[in-house]
Image: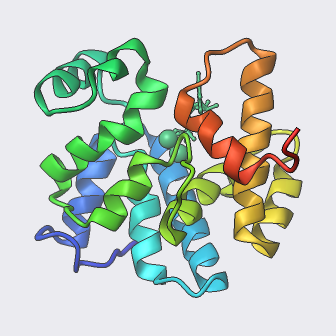
Amino acid sequence: MLHFDETYSPLTSDEIIAKARANMDASRFEHCIGVSETARHLAHLNGYDENKAALTGFIHDYAKQVSDADFIAAIKTQGFDLELLKWNRLIWHGIVGTYFIKRDLKIMDAEILRAVWYHTTGAPKMTALDKIVFVADYIEPRRSFAGVDQARQVSFANLDAGVGYELTHTLEFLLAKRARIYPQTLLAYNVWGAEKGE
Ligand code: GDP
Ligand code: FE
Ligand code: FE
């Protein structure tokens, strides 16, 4: 039975699960379960609190299917950097997702919230939990892109190398599409992905 650590919210595990289920479709919910399980495994391998990692993995995409209008309203009224308005829901759902997680799931733990905040872009400075969630999101069992097996191998052997692999390959993927790069993604790549100064 699905059960999460109840020390980070006044809500019960069942209430958190019910709210998450109601906020997303079935396949996104399954993805969140996969990220939770993979985060637990990565936490085990790296000596981090497994229950905290499992909860954070589960909620990382809580806001993935929030409407654009609700994201925009939250950015404008909740003190977010208004530069965010130039981006889109791919970037918003982690950063602004922290607001919806606080509001709905009553989770206020700073370490959990920052791991959700950075889960899409990474960051130059990442905590153990940031890395665990970032990597678990990329390699959870339902992911099936070319290279995912190598990503899993690298990440299970060395978490930092997994972060570097993911940033490098995400950047290649985005550049191939001529997508706009969020500055934080690039800053993170320079720290975790780049292997040469020149
Ligand atoms: P998901 O929420 O489980 O689908 O995974 P993520 O939150 O990691 O990523 C959401 C999407 O954002 C992915 O398709 C990434 O390729 C994309 N993404 C990550 N960084 C950037 C960026 O700098 N620019 C753009 N345009 N997209 C990005
Ligand atoms: Fe996400
Ligand atoms: Fe995700």
Q: Quadrant of ligand 1?
A: top right
Q: Is residue 145 visible?
A: yes
Instruction: Work out whether 136 lies above or below 143.
Output: below
Q: Nearer the viewer, residue 137 or 32?
A: 137
Q: Is residue 176 left or right of residue 53?
A: right
For the N terminus, give its image quadrant. Answer: bottom left
Q: Quadrant of the C terminus?
A: top right
Identify the residue shown where x is 50% and y is 61%.
130
**Residue 1 visible in the snapshot:** no
Please tell me whether residue 119 is drawn above or below residue 153 in the rendered image.
above
The residue located at (57%, 65%) in the rendering is 132
Q: Tell me the quarter of the picture where residue 18 sits.
A: bottom left
Foreground pick, 18 / 99: 99
- Residue 103 is situated, as x and y percent measured from the top left of the image, at 13, 47
User: Where is residue 196 drawn, in percent x and y?
Assistant: 88, 47
Instruction: State left or right for residue 55 relative to residue 34.
Output: left
The front one of 140 and 76 is 76
**Drawn side of residue 7 relative to residue 90, left or right:** left
Where residue 156 appears, as percent x and y from the top left, is 77, 71
- Vertical comparison of 180 with 65: above or below: above
Q: Quadrant of residue 69?
A: top left
Task: Say which residue appears at 14% left-offset and 33% top-offset.
Answer: 78
